[in-house]
Amino acid sequence: MKNMIDEKKQGASLILESDTNNSKKLFIESYGCAMNFSDSEIVASILSKQGFNTTQHLEEADLVLVNTCSIRDKAEQTVRKRLEKYNAVKRINPKMKVGVLGCMAERLKSKFLEEEKIVDLVVGPDAYKDLPNLIAEVEDGRNAVNVILSKEETYGDISPVRLNSNGITAFVSITRGCDNMCTFCVVPFTRGRERSRDVQSILKEIDDLASKGYKEITLLGQNVDSYLWYGGGLKKDFEKASEIQKATAVNFSKLLALCAKAQPKMRIRFSTSNPQDMSLDVIETMAKYDNICNHIHLPVQSGSDRVLKAMNRLHTRKEYFTLIDNIRRIIPECAISQDMIAGFPTETEKDHKDTMSLMEYVKYNFGYMFTYSERPGTLAERKLEDDVPETIKKQRLSEIIELQLKHSEYRTKQHLNKTVEVLIERESKKSNLHWSGRTQHNIVAVFPKGEFKIGDFVNVKVTDCTKATLIGEGVSKSKNN
């Protein structure tokens, strides 16, 4: 069971639409949330027009970029260790330039240049279009920084280059920023206010992916349920919009329906939702369209009302249960996953038991679980003492993980002897005789290759399972092919 979501990393593979005239090499690594991986594809697209093709080989790179995460201190330390590796390569190739992108860049700004002498440029999440100018400054012998947060930028006019793509699944960014101001979270400070992307640019990107053979997309945002397109502008300014803009506005439920209808044979996923913003119409839209996957990632963070209030989570335990009940009523077999923080400041043993009892009520399919990590600049860092001992944090996290593993096994076993639809994404890591893919519920399934191929939707009869993986036999291609 994964409990460290921000430790995901990925080096860039060759650009699929590589320009043979490009002579410079870009190596780009991404850490953290799916939005960072999506942003790296934006960066690769921008730089491909500046003469860069991506490479998997760090040693041959002219430019090395690391897209960073600031969700916890351990994520930042991982990046700093990676910079040490870059520095070793730079001693051999002194012409190589190194840049830091993403949330860590936005948080530390020019301080990064002082702390990490290897770094030549620092670029925040809203400043990627300025990369050509910043790189020119670096090539002229100057360090370069641009970390100004934007109120308009969504990168909706840029067609991403699909890095490390299997040609089957892709991310489509629909919103940027977050207005919720959870006391533990740096995202509002590193990614700015909520603003949504033009509906038509989203549909155009999805149509383009379908034309290239992609079979599944994930709509991305720090808080997808806050999506609201009324012609541009911040969500907080919607009340100032004209009556025509309000009447024609598209919220997340309407966007989901538009995407599902535009490509009825393409699977639609989305992430991440905030319990306080998810409405019944979103759940009802999911139920209405077969190609919207029956999985909701619904971070709760704690099962204690007192801790939820201290976190500035604008929902209660009871309201969360009501939302769960509505999901189960409208989509009975919907998979639900969680984020959970152990050891938030002032958390007592009773608060921890409340979290455990909430988990028992929901029985999540899977989750991402962490110990609390104090983040500079957040309200929790400024106002709350990090007073839960590390040993207790780790013990509580261990208990949360153990319970989640039990629930994951319970949920996975519910699919035994059933037939599920699986989209083949890759060869199994454990056997070159088996395919690996995911069900609508985001559960990994493996089965013998047979006559099937990557990109096929296959009906799989489940005969066995582990805690997190379905094992079965391919019966036939599904009607979605």
Image: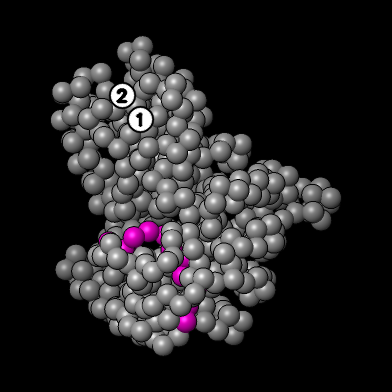
Q: Residue at x 25, y 18 (%)?
A: 95
Which residue of the protein is positioned furthest toward the front in this rendering? Answer: 451
Which residue of the protein is positioned furthest toward the top in this rendering? Answer: 140
Tag 1: amino acid: Leu
| In the rendered image, the vertical position of residue 478 relative to residue 235, given as above or below | below
**Quadrant for the C terminus in the image:** bottom right
Instruction: Give the colouring mode of the picture.
Output: one colour
Q: Is residue 425 rendered magenta in the image?
A: yes
- The residue labelled by disc 2 is 62
Q: Residue at x 54, y 69 (%)?
A: 293
Q: Is residue 390 visible?
A: yes
Query: x and y percent of residue 307 in the render?
Result: 40, 71
Task: Give the alpha-carbon distance from disc 2 to disc 1, as whole Å.
Answer: 6 Å
Residue 470 vs residue 396, the one in the foreground: 470
Which comes sooner in the sequence, label 2 or label 1? 1
**Quadrant for the N terminus in the image:** bottom left
Residue 243 vs residue 197, the one in the foreground: 197
Query: x and y percent of residue 8 in the render?
Result: 31, 53
What span is colored magenta in the figure?
Answer: 419-429
Query: x and y percent of residue 252 in the render?
Result: 64, 60
Tag 2: amino acid: Asp
Please give the label number shown on residue 26.
1
Q: Residue at x 53, y 58 (%)?
A: 215
Which quarter of the figure has residue 30?
top left
CB under 8 Å between discs 2 and 1: yes
Q: Residue at x 35, y 15 (%)?
A: 139
